[in-house]
Amino acid sequence: MTENNPILYFAPSTCARVALTALEEIGQPFETRLVAFMAGEHRKPEYLAINPAGKVPALQTKAGVLTQNGAILLYLAQTYSESGLLPLSGDPHADASLVSSLFRMSSDLHPLVTRFVLPGMILSDPASSAHVRVKAEEVLKLQLEPIATQLDKQDWYLGDRWSILDAYLAWIWFRITGAGFDSATFPTIADHYQRASERPSAQAALQTEARAQQELAERGLAFTPPKL
């Protein structure tokens, strides 16, 4: 690391976009390292020494490596409290409620994204993919409906101020609508996605991803999602 700058290990379009957006929102120097999944770099000893799960994101800090989006985002919110990633107050119940919302994204919604977008990753029988997608879509609608109702009454997930929860929700929406989820199902979430994507931090994260995607294409390692 240069001058103890944090290093984010990422791949374009993955959930690492949320941590990347958080780092851009903070506005302090950081570095990135592209993990080329199509080259198997996530399974090589060098990367497994960083994240034994072989996934992104991973964040190298001066205190050590952090993995799992929720943990990374909570660390960044606490370390750079002035950035407003989460309105942590020090009150145990209020802060636990915020962390609960973060877990809602990472534990309730995020796994459904994988089942809807890439069902083949969790199946030994490819013929079952369609059934998994249908069920995932059904549960996604159940999980997203109260969020849509919430956004009918307020601009952002927590009220009138953006938080990193909005970046997480935007990534979830990006992934599922990109895989065929009808954006007209929840117009308020579609509108939220547009506004969240216009933030300078989100635009900067997308530019970093675009450069990474170009690098992967030049190396012949661009990922083409399977036809569903």
Image: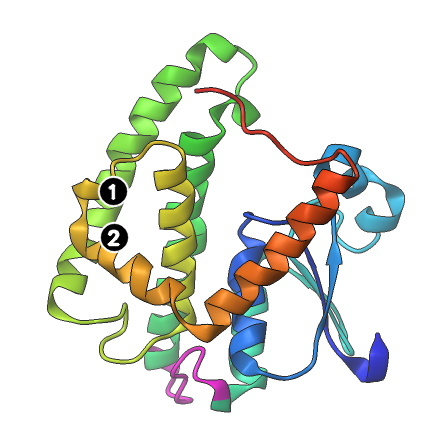
The N terminus lies in which quarter of the figure? bottom right
> Which residue occupies the foreground of this view, 145 or 53?
145
Estimate the x, y position of residue 167 in percent, counting from the top left: 42, 64
Callouts 1 and 2 close, C-beta under 8 Å: yes
Viewer can see residue 24: yes
Label 1: which secondary element: helix
- Please indicate, yes or no, whether residue 108 appears anywhere in the rendered image: no
- How far from the left and from the top, in percent, is residue 85? 45, 78
Outermost residue, right side = 45
Read off the residue under disc 1: 183
Magenta-drawn segment: 83-93
Q: Is 137 situated left or right of 17 in this image?
A: left
Q: Which mark is residue 190?
A: 2
Question: Is 166 included in the stretch rendered in magenta?
Answer: no
Nearer-the-camera pick, 57 or 107:
57
Q: CA distance from mark 1 to mark 2?
A: 6 Å
Question: Between disc 1 and disc 2, whose residue precedes?
Answer: 1
Instruction: Classify 29 as above or below 133.
Output: below
Residue in view at x 43 percent, y 12 percent? 128
User: Which residue is at 62% across, 61% downward?
Assistant: 208
Q: Position of residue 7 (x, y in %)?
A: 74, 68
Question: Does 201 sit above or below residue 133?
Answer: below
Toward which corner of the image does residue 223 lie, by quadrant?
A: top right
Near-viewer residue (3 or 100): 3
